[in-house]
Every structure is written in C-alpha cells, then in structure tokens.
Image (cartoon, rainbow, N blue to C red):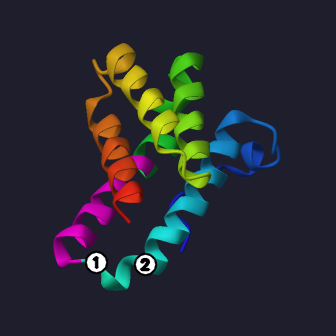
Amino acid sequence: AQLLDVMSSDESCDKQSIRYITVENFNKVWTQLCASSGSTSPMDKKILVDMERKLVALLGSRQYIVLASRAKELVSNIAINLVERKKDPANESLKSLQTEFWDGNAVWITALRRLVETVFKK
C-alpha cells in the first residue's frame, strides 16, 4: 500500500525534487507500518488512517507548494530519519518544525508527530 500516491505526472518526472524524495521515503515508512499493522490495536489502526489522510492532504495539495523551503527540508529530514530509524534526528527536525511552523500547520504537523511516535514505538 502506498500512503502518498499524490504526485502529478509533471512532478513525478523530477525524481530529484525534495517533494518526490519525501514522498518516496514516506511510502517506505508507510509500507513498513502497514506490514506490521496486523498486530496493532483498533485505536492504532484508526490513528494510522487519520495520519494517512492528513499527510496526503498536505503532500498532495497546493499547501505543500507554498510551504517555506525550510519547512520542506524539515519534513524531508523527518522522512529520511524515519526510513533510517534515527529517532533523535527525527525528533529534532520535528521539534524545529513545530517551533517554526506551527501556526497554520498544526493539523499536519500533529499527524507527522504521531507518525514519528508510531514508528519508534514499534
């Protein structure tokens, strides 16, 4: 299952873009979570569905395009650190994201925080 099948055909051609790389890394993380979701509680599954909806809404929308490059970099760093299972750097990037970009972005940042918590809870 792919979490973020959200790229337009134009964007998917640029495999070097930060958005493309971020989406690919989140897909890797999501695939791992879905593979282990058979052993999760109904509440955890509900949280996974909620995270998916909010992250797809972010990365598949114009909101991502107008996001500051620093915020995009932090989101990308979180995705990379989740794939590489590096908890401290992921949490540092998340803390910076929350501190610098919380206003107007709380919904998807909260979903991202839950994703980080879920990955490192496994």
Determine if the magenta segment contains residue 52. Answer: yes
Q: 40 or 67: nearer the eye?
A: 40
Give, as a single range, the part of the protein colored magenta.
41-55
Residues at marks 2 and 1 touching, judged by CB atoms closer than 8 Å: yes
For the residue labelled by badge 2, is the local secondary structure a helix, a strand or a loop?
helix
Asked if 65 appears above or below 21 in the picture, the reply is: above
Q: 104 or 109: nearer the eye?
A: 109
Q: Main secondary structure of the magenta part?
A: helix
Residue 87 visible to an observer of this rendering: yes
Q: Residue at x 34, y 60 (%)?
A: 121
Which residue corresponds to mark 2? 36
Alpha-carbon neighbours of circle 1 within 10 Å: few (<14), some, or many (≥20)?
some
Which quadrant holds the N terminus? bottom right
Residue 6 visible to an observer of this rendering: no
Q: 43 or 61: nearer the eye?
A: 43
Identity of the amino acid at label 2?
Ser
Q: Residue at x 52, y 39 (%)?
A: 78
**Left/right of residue 14 with respect to residue 108 in the rendered view:** right
Q: Residue at x 52, y 70 (%)?
A: 32
Identity of the amino acid at label 1?
Thr
| View extreme (bottom): residue | 38
Which residue corresponds to mark 1? 40
Number of marks in the image? 2
For the residue labelled by badge 1, is the local secondary structure a helix, a strand or a loop?
loop
Asked if 121 appears above or below 89 in the picture, the reply is: below
Alpha-carbon neighbours of circle 2 within 10 Å: few (<14), some, or many (≥20)?
few
**Left/right of residue 59 with respect to residue 14 in the rendered view:** left
